[in-house]
Amino acid sequence: MEIPEKTSRIDIPKKAIYRLSIYYRCLQKLRANDVDTVSSTTLARAAGVKPAQLRKDLAYFGQFGTRGLGYPVEILATIIRDTLGREHLQPVILVGAGNLGSALLRYHGFEKEGFEVIAAFDANPEATRARGVSVPVFSDSELESFIDTHAVKLAILCVPVEFAQAVVNRLVVAGIQGVLNFSPIVLEVGPEVTVNNVDLAMELEHLSYFIH
């Protein structure tokens, strides 16, 4: 089976994009184990979704897979990778390189998922450089010019809550279209910008419900 030719950008809902990321990770594991074909039932179970949901998500790519045989792992992984823009590493910046930000700068898992943190910005860059991170750290006054020069569209936000909205306003004006927000605040942005919030305290609160 050949890989379908690329067409114009597919309009896929945000929730489906998230599930496609999970499918892609599962397919990477299958490839690592030299698995050539996977059924919708097996892939759905690995991804934690129902088979009907998986088939609906993959239907965005048109008729794909063979009844009774399943999906070719290599081809499906390539199609999802191209759809998610992972053919090349996507540049990301991090703003707010304190304790949490510096820890994220030391995390090497981003590259495995197709992203590269190319720079960090902080009001006190010297303090972050003293932590020994390998990512270049700049003053936050250089934020806009760096985004423009490097055509960055994604940012990780780790600034204190009282500065978060002001910083995200700067990011949006500079051209950032996607923000992974670790500040515990609901950010106000236009419809052209996507914000994913990571509230660590809330996640712990959810976990505590299951502790007896």
Image: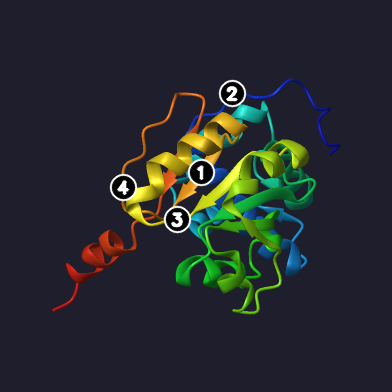
Q: Nearer the viewer, residue 205 or 37?
A: 205
Find the distance from the CA under tag 4 to the CA under tag 1: 13 Å
Crowdedness near tag 3: few (<14), some (14–19) or many (≥20) residues, C-alpha within 10 Å:
few
Is residue 70 shown left or right of residue 96? right
Q: Quadrant of the N terminus?
A: top right
Mark 2 lies on a secondary structure that is loop
Instruction: Identify the residue shown where x is 81% and y is 30%.
Output: 4
Query: Of the residues under marks 2 and 3, which one precedes in the sequence?
Result: 2
Depth check, mark 2 against mark 3: the one in front is 2
Residues at discs 4 and 1 in contact (Cβ within 8 Å): no
How far apart marks 2 and 3 lie (CA) works out to 23 Å
The residue that label 1 is drawn on is 179
Circle number at residue 26: none
**Disc nearer the start of the sequence (4/1):** 1
Residue to which mark 4 is pinned: 185
The mark that comes first in sequence, 2 or 4, is 2
Q: Amino acid at mark 3?
A: Gly
The residue to which callout 2 is attached is: 11
Residue 21 lies, in percent from the top left, at 58, 49
Instruction: Give residue 108's quadrant in the image.
Output: bottom right
- For badge 2, the amino acid type reads Asp
- Look at mark 3 in the image and give the residue it sits on: 48
Marks 2/1: CA–CA distance: 20 Å
Q: Position of residue 62 (x, y in %)?
A: 67, 26
Quadrant (top left, top right, bottom left, bottom right) of the C terminus: bottom left
- Hey, what amino acid is under mark 1? Val
Q: Which residue is rendered at x = 61% and y = 33% of the image?
A: 174
Q: Nearer the viewer, residue 4 or 21?
A: 21
